[in-house]
Amino acid sequence: MGNELLRSKERILAIDALRGFAVMGIILLHNIEHFNYYSFPKTDSPLLASLDKHLWDMLFFLFSGKAYAIFALLFGFTFYLQNHNCEKRGEDFRNRYMWRLVLLLGFGFINASFFPGEILVLYALLGFVLVPVRHLSDKTVMWIAFFLMLQPLEWGKVIYALICPEANPQQMIYSLGDVYPQLGGSSWWEMVKVNFTTGQLASLNWAWCYGRVFQTASLFMIGMLLGRKGLFRLTEENRGQVTKFWLRTGFYALPCAVLLYYLKDFIYSQIKNPFLKASMETIWNSWYNLAFMLVMVSTFLLLYWTNKGKVQQILVPYGKMSLTDYITQSIIGSFIYYGYGLEMHRYCGTTLSLLIGIAFFLLQLAFAHWWFRHFKRGPLETIWHKLTWIRF
């Protein structure tokens, strides 16, 4: 079925809209976090303090760990599309794809210079896992993805903690706190240097210690599998099968998400060993974010197809230039909140930062709509595409 569905070169607009939704969630979270510079003003207003807390909790509940998971899922799907289209032309996409990842690594380095917490470097490094699995059977890839989603490293830590209950080894060698003096300082160059080195090492260290590495690799493979099965494209021929799949996915994922959410505090409260507790939190949160993400994806796609995208299609141009959106929000966001720029971290709590994030998103959205009235791809997407397919 997947081969027939991809005969058309028409973009899958529902996926562009979904990608745009994920990037929107990321930009709102980054703004209330002050782009990982956790410096906030004190407020004497109990009402504003309460509003700040509730908005913070709501945004983290909705998007934290879920928006990035959607991004990873669609990364794997995009790989499938490009690989499949190359194979139809009788070309091997492997080397071209690995070169594409090198280019993505370069974009990630640029982004990392402004934002200590970016994901493009991680995606570029982990993207290589798709090369050896791209021709494996669906069943084999599914079992590999399942194994990675179980967080095997964390279960190894759990066993070690049970054998050596007094053990509590240091896991975070690099910390985002190490870059705070430069983020709050007035030197742009010092900020860039520390973000590119210590900030990026802290980001990768965090991803390794908190399960993001195994989860992301798993989601890459799941996205590839969904592409193989044609479950991201709705046609008259497959409407029943696709809608049934996403209805069942949402039906099973929702109670799992609710159960994981309400049990987590009880589970954590039963564990006294800090090393064991940290590993169980990583495992539990990874599974919860997966379940919640699947609820969000299934709901979003079903609503899009039911209403023919009448509402969500506004996000399509935004999703088509997600690389440009993501990098420009880091560059501009750092200027807004860090010490070398406007220093808005000194004046903006969660509520004001969220308003800035919404305004920022709307400006990016308006720019995306204008851009695609004149051009086929986003600015950075055009560069990435041309360099990917350059003839050596």
Image (cartoon, rainbow, N blue to C red):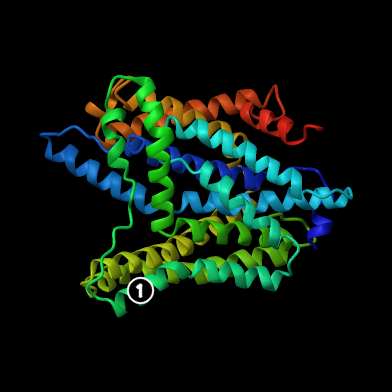
- Which one is nearer the viewer's eye here, 264 or 24? 264
Q: Determine whether, in the image, residue 303 is placed left or right of residue 172.
A: right
At 41% across and 73% down in the image, what residue appears? 155
Task: Rate crowding at label 1 as few (under 14), some (14 to 19) or many (20 or more) other CA atoms within 10 Å.
Answer: some
At 43% across and 28% down in the image, what residue appears? 360
At 36% across and 35% down in the image, what residue appears? 35
- Which one is nearer the viewer's eye here, 197 or 384? 197
Figure check: 139 above or below 39 = below
Residue 64: tell me if it is visible.
no
Residue 293: tell me if it is visible.
yes
Identify the amino acid type marked 1.
Answer: Val
* Numbered disc 1: secondary structure: helix
Residue 176 occupies which quadrant of the picture?
top left
Q: Determine whether, in the image, residue 279 is placed left or right of residue 379.
A: left
**Image x and y of residue 154, in percent:** 41, 68
Residue on which the image places disc 1 = 158
**Image x and y of residue 313, in percent:** 61, 40
Q: Residue furthest left?
A: 44
**Image x and y of residue 145, in percent:** 58, 67
> How many badges with numbers are in the image?
1
Q: Determine whether, in the image, residue 100 is placed left or right of residue 278.
A: right
Q: Residue furthest right?
A: 90
At 26% across and 72% down in the image, what residue appears? 266
